[in-house]
Structures are given as structure tokens and as C-alpha cells.
Amino acid sequence: MRRLLPAVACALTALAAPSLAAATVSGKISFVTKRGQNPVANETLVWLEPAGKTVRKPPQTFQMMTRGKTLVPHVLAIPVGSTVEFPNDDPISHNLFSLSSNNTFDLGLYRRGAGKSHKFDTPGVVNVYCNVHPNMSAVIHVMATPYYTLADAAGNYALADIPPGKYRLVAWNEQGGTTNSDLDVSAAGAVSGALALTLDSRNYRITQHMDKNGKPYQAPKEY
């Protein structure tokens, strides 16, 4: 009987201890624009940066398709260490590349088919271009945090199963840049902080990037 007492005491202590509740962090992204601008709301990436260490999502394999001289999706978020396949669905050749810091790559010229792939080991923003067609572009976000999502067409977002702690909420859009706010998720799952974020697109300018050699594009060619 005496041997059972410590086990019973531990069980009662465990039952008495408050359980931590995960939260859903949700809100809305809006834009300040000027005439002629039309930011794509569902290409807005929203994520949480924990104040402390966090477990990363396991690497996966994703696709970014070349179709109609367009990269689909235009914005892709992936966990660190993931691989992106770049199949070509066009009857012409493409040469996808990036000069983004710590995530440079050059897939070379390739025709229709399965295409090529690249593994992304460093967190950050990767601007993807085609060395043949200067109007082609896309953005890959290599994420160190497991808490991220894309907003919907109305700018609404929701991040589920967020454990208690302090976070920085960040929103990014290609035209609106970034904005952020500090959040706190309590042990009871209550969320405090600004959840409605506004991105200012008025200073956005379309600029022509250089080719993979850092030089202006020559007259377009078809392959």
C-alpha cells in the first residue's frame, strides 16, 4: 500500500496541473495603394516568428511549374531543406536561376518535361527568374518557422495549433513589402496583439532585373 502512495500522488499532481492550450491566430491583411496598383491578396505570406527556439517542419518536395511563360505558383513557401522541382510545360525552353544571397542556383537551359530541381538549405527570400524570358519571375520563401500560411483572396489568414509563447507576426507581399506586430499567446490559448495588418504598396516600383550574369537582357530568343 505504501508503494502505491507516491504513484497516486504523482497522478493527482498531473491532474491538478493546468494544461497548455494551443491557439488559432487569425486576422486580415489590407493594403494602402495608389491608382493603378492591384496587389494580389492571396499571394500574401503570413508567418509567426517565435521568441525562443522552435521545431522546424520536416523538408518536403514541392513543384513550381513553368506554363505559358509563367511560373506557377508565383509565391511558394517551403520548409528549410526542402527541394523544389521545376517542370517545364511549355513547348519552348527555359533557364531558371536565382542570384539571391545564400540561395543562388542556375538550372541551365532545358526543354519541356520533368525539368530540374534544387534543394534550399538556407532560410530567406529567393527571387526566381528565367534567363531567356525577362518577364518571368516568382518568389520562394524558405521558412525557418513552422507557422506560416498564405492569405485568401479577401486577405484573411489563419494559423492553427500555435502553442503558448511570444511571437512576431509578419506579413509579406511582393508589392507591399513587409509589416509586423508582436503577439502573445497565453497558457489558456488567448491571443493578444494586433492581428489586422496593413501593407503599404505606394512605393512599389517595377524594375528590370539583370540576367544570370548580372547584365541587361539581350533581345528575346525562342528555343
Image (cartoon, helix red, strand yellow):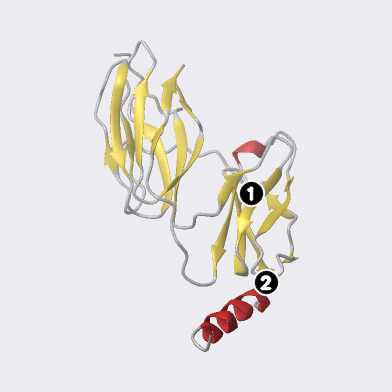
Q: Residues within 10 Å of mark 2 (few under 14, many from 20)?
A: some
Across and down, in percent, residue 110 comes to 26, 21
- From where the camera sits, is residue 214 visible? no
Q: Residues within 10 Å of mark 1 (few under 14, many from 20)?
A: few
Q: Secondary structure at mark 1?
A: loop
Residue carrying label 1: 203
Across and down, in percent, residue 182 comes to 66, 68
- Disc 2 marks a residue whose amino acid type is Ala
- Disc 1 marks a residue whose amino acid type is Asn
- From where the camera sits, is residue 112 visible? yes
Q: Residue 215 occupies which quadrant of the picture?
A: top left
Q: Is residue 189 above or below residue 77?
A: below
The answer to whether 136 appears left or right of 20 in the picture is: left
Are the residues flagged by discs 2 and 1 in contact, CB closer than 8 Å? no
Tell me what residue is drawn at x 67 percent, y 78 percent.
16
Residue carrying label 2: 187
Q: Secondary structure at mark 2?
A: loop
Tell me what residue is drawn at x 53 percent, y 80 percent.
7
